[in-house]
Image (tube, helix red, strand yellow):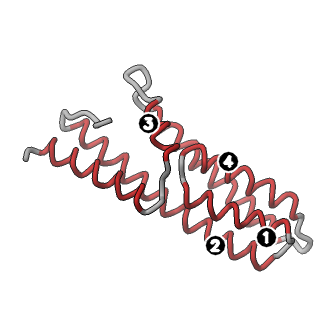
Amino acid sequence: MDGVAQLQKQLVDFTDSLFQEGFLDEQFNQLQQLQDESNPDFVVEVVSLFFEDSERLLNELAKALEQKTIDFRKVDAHVHQFKGSSSSIGAQRVQKVCIAFRNYCEEQNIEGCLKCLQQVKLEYSLVKNKLETLFKIEKQLIAAGGSIPT
């Protein structure tokens, strides 16, 4: 098996594992289908925006939950945004924590919210690492003269 074939196999196996472990869902496939020769960096660009958004929202959430009087509507609005952007790239596990997080906002349950903030940070950093690894394998594959299997 040559280097290209090996990288292709690595890419396919790694991508499969992301779906099996629930990090990504069908929405990520949809994104990949929107990428073509005229827009070869589409997925990386969309995901990079998701990373920027997420970092900002995590900071906003941490700030909002540190207040003496917590504005749960504001917290919920940030979580709602986070849920939307994670579902738009198919980050399924982040999205699921956001759903639980919104329930705690509704109940104005500060402990539940703080627990979800930690969980959402964890799931976000996991999916970020996984996607960065995925893009690294794709880059290596293209650099080796291969093409990304669709």
At label 3, which amino acid type do we have?
A: Gln
Residue 33, percent across and down? 44, 32
Disc 4 versus disc 1: distance between alpha carbons?
A: 17 Å
Disc 2 versus disc 1: distance between alpha carbons?
A: 14 Å
> Which quadrant holds residue 130?
bottom left
Q: Are marks 4 and 2 in contact (CB under 8 Å)?
A: no
Q: Are marks 4 and 1 in contact (CB under 8 Å)?
A: no
Position of 134 compared to 45: left or right?
Answer: left
Marks 4 and 3, the one that precedes in the sequence:
3
Of 25 and 115, nearer the camera is: 25
Per the rendering, the mark at residue 118 is 2
At label 2, which amino acid type do we have?
A: Gln
In the image, is residue 126 above or below residue 111? Answer: above
Marks 4 and 1, the one that precedes in the sequence:
4
Dot 3: within a 10 Å radius of its alpha carbon, few (fewer than 14), some, or many (20 or more) residues? Answer: some
Q: Which residue is mark 1?
A: 104
Disc 4 versus disc 3: distance between alpha carbons?
A: 18 Å
Q: Which residue is mark 4?
A: 84
At label 4, which amino acid type do we have?
A: Gly
